[in-house]
């Protein structure tokens, strides 16, 4: 018997091997989906058997024998094979690249002699968690209706659960999961979240809600053994609930009954390298293949999602009230009753001193005086984004990237936030010797310093990637905020995720303008979503709360929509703009990028690629340098391709890439290139 095997290599077709005879015939029947080891060139690699065949396509005498079938891991189910194959086709990679990449790292290499013993140990280790059963809270009417709608869906259906932070979305997920698991003792649920490390509370809530059921977490920061153990538990049907980041969308779940994507708009669901898949989109596909419901939860759904909800393709479930709020007359706008009062401080009228303008400094002082907490959000870490010599105009740049090097004050370094380059601070200007170098602009460290200067008695804590580099420090920091040991919290986006700061009554937003005037058409959508999340931190315990935005554009409609928590109005406007400008979701896009030693050769490769024949429906634009034109010494260029529908795009790009691969193999030196379908940034 012959088998077709996929391996982690950019091959258009599965490879064919001879399955050595003499095995148990019953085993031969169940060989599809098995992991195996095969010879490939002079290497031995892991593969997955996807098909058996009586006669191979290549000459029989050229077929090599498969090394070994891994009988200790159950065959990957047909739906898993279908999902990985779909992802490969859609994102324009080889099936094996997606499938092998979706296995836990320990299964991606040929097993050593002690492998089976190790597997069995891992099986024992992943046992049922013993959580403290918690009292379930009574769902309010909207929550109950949402959970009922989800639980009642017998087939594939996409639900959008739309509600601000604290509106009780998680309780709805838990209830929907509980009903599914109760209805079928073997049923499994998949819950995808953008980041696990920042939300240990969710894991605890799940454990408390499902004591005695096996819950496994899957994310890339896990130790290898734990990840394999969790994956096996999911694959073998022992885990009832899988909580994971984007990679968990590929966890094999033989009895999948419900898929939930929390914070579905979050950009981290899109993979940034390798196969650039969107875990949210694949979660929907996966639910469709398994014929089960999928829930997309968000306070600010992705515009792509909202588009389908508005068109009735997805079912919209709204949560309008926050269960824990003191009952107050609801604002007419549809905002939750305790939505903070949002106002803009016009930077042109109130020139900032040390980055903060007077009304903001005043508000911080008043909040402190009342014994309440302030949260200062600025999406830029470091002390200042650039250091300048006022004598000759020198600016600190990264020697390897076409970008500035940021000044970090605590360790007196210049650092590149793109490639990681760092150097100690120069004593004087490298070009003219002037000793007065000035920090230009503000990052979290500088804002922290300003606040400390203005409010010397305040307890100030900074949370960003630099302050939380050591494991556990982020969790500790958040604990300190919860415990009330912090008066002012300064931080990046990190502070906006999944945390519930009950005593925060003032939120200050700095530097939002950078995203308001960005070249990226998705920037306003991201900004709105971030601001809703940050604003949602405030005033959760009946404190009258405010959000102050320092901006040069106080009349921008985005801020007006934020003030009313009018996501729908904002989304409708944005979609109208996108329709007029022919941007997604009204067209499908793919981005071909090239990296080379010089910009010229990157651009000329793309120009040659553009000249290749392609389907009529595929429009290809001129190659241009990427926004970050040089990264770590490598020059980068991009070419945008688009089509009216995603189906046309997929077909067109697939045929075109055929030619591009061919071109790349003929070009010397060999160019490096990638394709990204539905690119997150252009
Ligand atoms: P979200 O996921 O939308 O941020 P959560 O489900 O985490 O909201 O709910 C926010 C808080 O309100 C949690 O502490 C939760 O336990 C509580 N909560 C949610 N629903 C109810 C309810 N119906 N009754 C009482 N408390 C609730
Ligand atoms: Zn100088
Ligand atoms: Zn750099």
Image (cartoon, grey):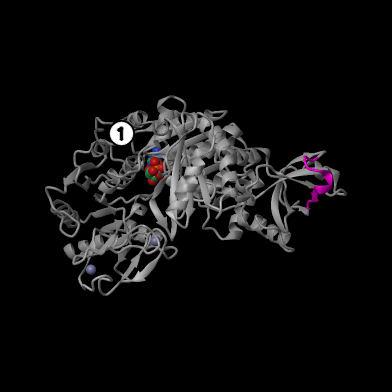
The front one of 196 and 410 is: 410
Which residue is the extreme one toward the left?
Answer: 349
The quadrant of the image that shows the C terminus is top left
Magenta residue check for 63: yes
Magenta range is 56-66
Q: Which residue is mark 1?
A: 570
Percent of width and height locating residue 85: 62, 40
The quadrant of the image that shows the N terminus is top right
Percent of width and height locating residue 429: 25, 71
State whether residue 49 is above or below residue 487.
Answer: above
State whether residue 111 is above or below residue 297.
Answer: below
Ligand 3's quadrant is bottom left
The front one of 322 and 131 is: 322
Along the horizontal axis of the image, is 198 left or right of 182?
Answer: left
Q: Residue at x 39, y 35 (%)?
A: 303
Magenta residue check for 387: no
Percent of width and height locating residue 556: 22, 38
């Amino acid at each position: 018997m012959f088998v077709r095997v996929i391996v982690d290599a950019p091959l258009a077709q599965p490879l064919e091997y001879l399955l050595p005879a003499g095995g148990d015939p019953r085993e031969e029947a169940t060989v599809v989906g098995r992991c195996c080891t095969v010879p490939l060139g002079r290497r031995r690699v892991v593969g997955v058997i996807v098909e058996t065949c009586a006669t191979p396509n290549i000459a029989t005498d050229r077929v090599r024998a498969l090394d070994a079938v891994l009988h200790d891991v159950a065959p990957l189910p047909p739906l898993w094979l279908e999902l990985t194959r779909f992802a490969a086709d859609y994102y324009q990679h080889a099936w094996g690249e997606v499938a092998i990449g979706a296995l836990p790292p320990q299964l991606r290499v040929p097993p050593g002699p002690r492998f089976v013993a190790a597997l069995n140990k891992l099986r024992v280790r992943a046992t049922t968690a013993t959580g403290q059963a918690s009292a379930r809270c009574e769902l309010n009417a909207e929550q109950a209706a949402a959970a009922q709608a989800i639980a009642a869906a017998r087939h594939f259906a996409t639900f959008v659960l739309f509600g601000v932070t604290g509106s009780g979305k998680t309780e709805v997920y838990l209830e929907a999961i509980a009903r599914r698991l109760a209805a079928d003792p073997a049923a499994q649920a998949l819950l995808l979240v953008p980041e696990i490390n920042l939300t240990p509370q969710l894991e605890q809530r799940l454990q408390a809600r499902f004591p005695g059921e096996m819950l496994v977490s899957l994310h890339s920061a896990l130790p290898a053994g734990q990840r394999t153990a969790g994956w096996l538990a999911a694959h073998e049907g022992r885990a009832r609930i899988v909580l994971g980041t984007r990679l968990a969308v590929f966890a094999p779940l033989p009895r999948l009954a419900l898929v939930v994507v929390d914070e579905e708009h979050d950009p981290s669901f899109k993979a940034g390298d390798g196969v650039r898949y969107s875990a949210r989109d694949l979660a929907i596909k996966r639910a469709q293949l398994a014929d089960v419901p999928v829930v997309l939860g968000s306070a600010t759904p992705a515009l792509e999602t909202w588009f389908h909800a508005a068109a009735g393709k997805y079912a919209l479930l709204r949560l309008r009230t926050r269960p824990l709020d003191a009952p107050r007359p609801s604002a007419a706008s549809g905002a939750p009753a305790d939505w903070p009062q949002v106002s803009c401080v016009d930077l042109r009228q109130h020139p900032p001193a040390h980055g903060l303008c007077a009304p903001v400094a005043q508000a911080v002082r008043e909040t402190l005086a009342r014994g309440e907490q302030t949260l200062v959000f600025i999406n830029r870490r470091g002390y200042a984004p650039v250091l300048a010599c006022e004598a000759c105009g020198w600016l600190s740049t990264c020697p390897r990237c076409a970008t500035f090097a940021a000044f970090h004050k605590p360790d007196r370094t210049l650092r590149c936030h793109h490639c990681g380059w760092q150097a100690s601070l120069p004593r004087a200007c490298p070009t003219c010797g002037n000793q007065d170098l000035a920090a230009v602009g503000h990052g979290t460290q500088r804002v922290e310093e300003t606040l400390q200067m203005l409010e010397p008695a305040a307890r100030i804590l900074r949370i960003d990637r630099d302050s939380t580099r050591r494991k556990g420090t982020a969790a500790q920091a958040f604990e300190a905020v919860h415990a009330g040991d912090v008066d002012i919290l300064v931080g990046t986006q990190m502070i906006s995720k999944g945390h519930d700061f009950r005593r925060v009554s003032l939120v200050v937003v700095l530097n939002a303008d950078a995203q308001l005037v960005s070249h990226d058409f998705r920037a306003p959508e991201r900004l709105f979503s971030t601001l809703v999340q940050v604003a949602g931190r405030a005033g959760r315990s009946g404190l009258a709360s405010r959000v102050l935005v320092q901006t040069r554009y106080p009349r921008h409609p985005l801020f007006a929509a934020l003030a009313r928590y009018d996501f729908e109005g904002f989304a409708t406007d944005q979609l109208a703009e996108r329709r007029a400008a022919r941007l997604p979701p009204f067209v499908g896009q793919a981005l071909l990028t090239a990296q080379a030693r010089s910009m010229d050769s990157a651009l000329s490769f793309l120009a040659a690629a553009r000249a290749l024949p392609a389907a009529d429906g595929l429009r290809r634009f001129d190659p241009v340098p990427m926004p970050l034109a040089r990264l770590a010494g490598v020059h980068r260029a991009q070419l945008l391709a688009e089509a009216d529908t995603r189906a046309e795009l997929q077909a067109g790009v697939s045929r075109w890439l055929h030619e591009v691969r061919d071109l790349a193999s003929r070009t010397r030196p060999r160019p490096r290139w990638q394709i990204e379908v539905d690119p997150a940034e252009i």
